[in-house]
Image (spheres, grey):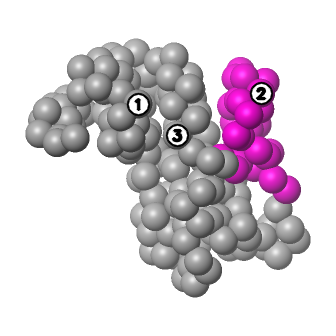
Amino acid sequence: MFTGDYMENKSVFDAGPFIHLHEIGQLNLLHLFVKVLTTSEIVGECQRIKTIILKIKNVGEKNLTPQSKDFTRYLVEKYGLDLGESTGIALCKQEQVGIFFTDDLEAKEAAIHLGFGAHGTIAIIMRALRNDLLTRKEAIEILNLLYEKSTLFLTKDLKDWVILEILKFKK
């Protein structure tokens, strides 16, 4: 279980949020974060957009220590996660980062079980709204793009619920 200090100025990202934000032309939302960390395995899953991601000023690729690589193997075996997701969670532990961004439900559940915060692409949109980087109208437009144009599995019911939450949001 995660016992280090919560490092809000750092986040670890799995491939999903990178890919889904790119699909809707919103990688600029990564500027919400002081530092975005990821692993070479995750970057490898983003092969088509690898150079774009690594050119973003606040995105950094970190190597795992031998101990973190062992923890990655444990995560693959214990939780049945893919290598990328497992390296992301291992990087959270290694760097004492309290938040992991992934759109994979099993990876979110494993991260939460281990004591990390776990969020997905929709949370990034909501954070941008809370930080006044998006208006309600823009947040809804981006959410609709995510639903219509990205490969993120997003049900209509969830999209509609998030829109209601956006409309209720008080600045």
Looking at the rendered image, the disc whose residue lies closer to the viewer, 1 or 2, is: 1
Asked which secondary structure carries label 3, the reply is helix
Magenta stretch: give its range.
36-63
Q: Hey, what amino acid is under mark 1?
A: Leu
Residue topped by disc 3: 32
The residue that label 2 is drawn on is 55
Give residue 91's quadrant in the image: bottom right
Q: Is residue 120 above or below residue 49?
A: below
Q: Residues within 10 Å of mark 2 (few under 14, many from 20)?
A: few
The residue carrying pointer 1 sits among few (fewer than 14), some (14 to 19) or many (20 or more) residues within 10 Å by Cα, namely some
Tell me the SS state at disc 2. helix
Q: How many marks?
A: 3
Quarter holding the N terminus is: bottom right
Q: Are marks 3 and 1 in contact (CB under 8 Å)?
A: yes
In the visual, does 59 lie left or right of 18?
Answer: right
Q: Nearer the viewer, residue 40 or 141?
A: 141
Name the residue at 20% across, 35% down: 166
Q: Is residue 130 magenta?
A: no
Dot 1 or dot 2: first in sequence order is 2
Q: At x 62% / y 47%, what residue is drawn?
A: 34
Separation (CA) of disc 3 from disc 1: 9 Å
Q: Secondary structure at mark 1?
A: loop
Q: In the figure, is residue 19 to the left or right of 164? A: right
Question: Residue 40: image x %, image y %?
Answer: 80, 45
Mark toward the start of the polypeptide (2 vs 3): 3
Nearest to viewer (mark 2 / mark 3): 3
